[in-house]
Image: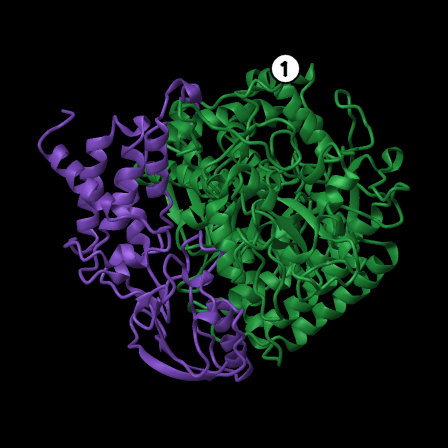
Chain colours: A green, B purple
Amino acid sequence: MELKPIELEPIELKAKVPAGPIEQKWDRHRFDMKLVNPANKRKHNIIMVGSGLAGGSAAASLAELGYNVQCFCYQDSPRRAHSIAAQGGINAAKNYRNDGDSIYRLFYDTVKGGDFRAREANVYRLAQVSVNIIDQCVAQGVPFAREYSGLLDNRSFGGAQVSRTFYARGQTGQQLLLGAYQALARQIDLGKVQMFPRTEMLDLVVVDGRARGIVVRDLVTGKIKSYSADAVVLGTGGYANVFYLSTNAKNSNATAIWRAYKRGAAFANPCFTQIHPTCIPVSGDYQSKLTLMSESLRNDGRIWVPLQKGDKRRPNDIPHPERDYYLERRYPSFGNLVPRDVASRAAKEVCDEGRGVGESGLGVYLDFADAIKRLGENQIREKYGNLFEMYERITAENPYQIPMRIYPALHYTMGGLWVDYNLMSTITGLFVIGEANFSDHGANRLGASALMQGLADGYFILPYTIGDYIATEKPEKVGVDDPAFHQAEGRIADLTKKLLAIRGKRTVDSIHQELGKLLWDYCGMVRNEKGLKYALGKVPEIREEFWKNANVVGAGDELNQALEKAGRVADFLELAELMCLDALDRNESCGAHFREEFETPDGEALRDDENYCYVSAWEYKGDGERPAMHKEPLSFEYVHLTQRSYK
Amino acid sequence: MKLTLHIWRQKNAEARGSLVKYDLDGVNPDMSFLEMLDVLNWNLIDNGEEPVAFDHDCREGICGSCCMMIDGVAHGPQPATATCQLHMRHFKDGDTVCIEPWRSRAFPVIKDLVVDRSAFDRIVQAGGYISVSTGSAPEANATLVPKQDADLSMDAAACIGCGACVAACPNGSAALFTSAKIAHLGLLPQGQPEREHRVLGMVAAMDAEGFGNCTMHRECEAVCPKEISTGFIARMNREYLRASLGAGK
C-alpha cells in the first residue's frame, strides 16, 4: 500500500478561558456550554485510552451520562493502572480542620507551588471541584482514614501548612483507583463501557482535522485494529520513564501522547519534569526502577547528612552537633516540608559536596528517632507501618532503628499535551486528561495534587466539556472503513516490521539506560546551556544506534514484550530531544526546571517573568525538522507574581 | 551468586509448555526477583532467544501484575511479599529455583508465565461496587463511619487482585479475593443498600468462572502479599446465608 504523507493542520493556541471573576468562571462556563439531549447521548461513541484515575473515572462518568464508551489499557486489567501506586493522599479544600484552608488557599498554594507557570483559571477550577471529589469517593466506599468520632481524618503533606490531605493508609492511590475501577466495572456490566485490556494505542487517526479514532495493537494476538468514535480522550499518564529509572511503572510510556503530537497535538512544557525527594537510592546497574517512599514521611522524619565530608561512621554513632539538618537550617519556617523541587536540589547539593551517605554517596538520612521518642514506636507504626516494611524489604535495614537513606528520583511530569480550558488539545476532538496533559501544576506539582487533578478531570470536568464539543460540533459519523484508518494501520504494520528487522547486537534496555543516564545528567535536577547542547547532540546518536543496533527478537503476531518495549523506547528517543530543546529555550529557572545560570545569590530558582511567563507549546514539523514553538502567555491577576520563598 | 533456573516456557495458549533449564551467573543479592529475570532476559536476547514473558508493572507490590509460582509457592518464600518485592538475598549461591505460572483452571496460560486473570474483573462486575453515579454523592462527613469499621474495611480493600490466593488453593478457589471485596464494601454504611445483591451476584460469578469451592485450607492467607485474612471468607459465608434467606427483601 502506498502511504500518503500526513497533512498537519497549522496550530493555533486558544486557551478559551471564560470571562468573569475567577470564582465564577467555571459556573458560568457550565451554564454556557451546550448540552446533549439525554436520548441522543447513546448515539455517540467516545474512545478513552487509559484506565487510571483520570481515564477510569472519565470512562465511568461518561457512560453514566449515557455515552457509549470504549476504554483501552495496556495492563491485563484496568485496576492495575499506575495511579494505584500513589501513596500519600489527595488534597481537598474541605477545611475540616478549621485551620484556615479554603478553595482560594488551595488555588493560591497550587499556583505558587507551580512557580507561576500554570493557568490561573484551570487551577481555581481544580480547587473548586476538589471538595466534590472527596464526597464522590467516600460515597463509592473508599475507606479513607477516620477519627474515633467516625469523621474523616486529614494530614498535612509536603509543601502545605494546612491539613487538607485525605488518605487511606499509605495506599491512597490504590483505594481511589479501585473506586474508579468499581464504577467502571458497573458500567461494563451494564454494557455501557466496552473494555479492551492488553491493548495498546499506537496511532491517532485524524479525519478532516478532527480526532476520529485510534489504531491499536492487541498485545496478545499482535493484531492491528482500528476503532472510530465521535471524540478521543487520552488519559495515558506521564513520560517520566524517558529517564529509564523513575518511580513510574515499568510499562508506563509516552507512546499515545507522542504519536498524537506527531498528528498535530501541541506538546506543552516538556522540560517540566518532577524529581521526588524521597526515593530509595539506586543500588546497582541492574536496577530496573526506583521506589518512592511517600513524602508524608517528611512530616515526622528529619532529614540530615553528616556535617563533615566523607564521614563514614554509622548514622547512630554520629552525635547531634555533628549532623547537618540542612532543610531545617536553610528553611526555618517550612523545614523538612519544603516543596519537592527545593528538597530535591538541596539533597543533590549536599551530596555534590561529598556529604552524601550510603555506599554510592548518593543519599541523605531521613531519621525517625526524634519522632519515635516523641510519639512512640506504635504511633509511627500506625502512620507509616507499610512504608517502613517496604523500605526494609528492599534494603534489609530496619528504619525504626537506623535512619532511612533516601535520594531524589524522577517521579512525575508536569509537561504534557497542551489543552485549552475544556481539556481539548490543538487537535479538534482530542481531549487529554490527568498527567498526560500539562494544565494545572505549572513548573512543579505539590504533593497529593496528582490524584486530585486526575479525578477532577475525569469525574467533574471532561464529562461536561466533551458534551459541549459534541453538541456544538455535531461530528458526523466516520467509520473505520475511512481511508485514513487504512493508512494508519499500514504505517503501524510497517513500523512493527521495521523494529523486528533491526536484529542488532544491543538490548533495547541497554540503549534506554544510556538515554536515561544522559537525560539525568544533563536534563535532570539541574540543567545548563552547555549540558543541554551536548545532550541535543547526543540524543540523535543514541537514536541512530537504536535503529541500527537494537535487537528486538520474536514476531509481531504474538504476545511480544520485547516488541512492545522497543516501540515505546523509539518514542522516548524522540521525546528526549524535545525535552532538551524546551529546557534550552527556557532561559530561567522555575519550579522543577533549574538552570544553573539563573539562580538567586542564595541558590534558589530565579524566574524571568518578563520574558518567560508563558507556556511553551511545541508543534511537530516532521521527522528531522525543528519543531515550532508557540507561546501561550500567562497572566496572574489573583496570585501576584512573587519570588517563592520557603525560608 | 549462581543459580540454576527451571522456567515454564509455553509459546501460546494452545501450545504445550515445558520447564526449561537456564544457568544464570552474576546474581546480586540486592536484586529483586524480577531484576534477576531481567538479567536472564538480557542474556537470552543477546543469544537471539526469546525472553521469558512475565507480567509486571509497578514493581512496588501494589499493582498486582506479577504472578509466579516460585518453587511451588505463590510469590515465593518471603511471607507478605509480592514477587516484585522479593529480593535475591533470600536465596543462596548454587540454589535451583523453579518458576511457573499460576496454575488454575480459571487462569489459562497465555504465554510462559503470563496468565489470563480477567475472571477477577468479571467477579467485580457482578456487584463489587457501590452504585453511586458521579455527582450524586452527599457531603463526605454527613455519614459517620466508626474507625474500627473503616480500618477493617481497609484491611480487606488492600487486596491487589494478583490471584496468588487462587494459585495456592488446592481447589483453585477465589473465595479470598471475592470475600475481601464483599467485606470492604459491606463493612461501610455506604455499602448497605446493595449488600445482598452484591454477595449473591459475586458468588454466582465466582462459580460461573470455574473457580473451586473453599474448604478452608487457608493456603490463600499464607501466600497473600497483603495478608488478607480468611476471616473475610467466614464473613462472606455469613453474608451469603443471610442474603439467601431473604434478608433485605
Up/down of A536 relative to A340, above or below = below
Which of the image's four quarters has the N terminus of chain A? bottom right
The percent coordinates of residue A470 (x first, y second) are: 52, 30
Residue toward you, A16 or B99: B99
Which image quarter: residue A92?
Answer: top right
Residue toward you, A620 or A408: A408
Q: Residue at x 60, y 30 (%)?
A: A422
Q: Quick check: A487 left or right of A529?
A: left
The percent coordinates of residue A515 (x first, y second) are: 69, 65
Q: Quick check: B204 left or right of A149?
A: left
- Residue A472 visible in image: yes
Residue toward you, A446 or A504: A446
Q: Residues within 10 Å of mark 1 (few under 14, many from 20)?
A: some
Q: Secondary structure at mark 1?
A: helix
Q: Residue at x 83, y 45 (%)?
A: A586
The percent coordinates of residue A191 (x first, y second) are: 32, 39
Residue toward you, A220 or B226: B226
Which of the image's four quarters has the C terminus of chain A? top right
Q: Quick check: B150 left or right of A16?
A: left
The percent coordinates of residue A313 (x first, y second) are: 69, 62
Q: Total label count? A: 1
Task: Identify the subunit bearing mark 1.
Answer: A
- Residue A592 visible in image: no
Up/down of B104 relative to B45, above or below = above
Give amino acid for label 1. Gln
Which image quarter: residue A571?
Answer: bottom right
Up/down of A52 relative to B51, above or below = above
Location of mark 1 (residue): A24
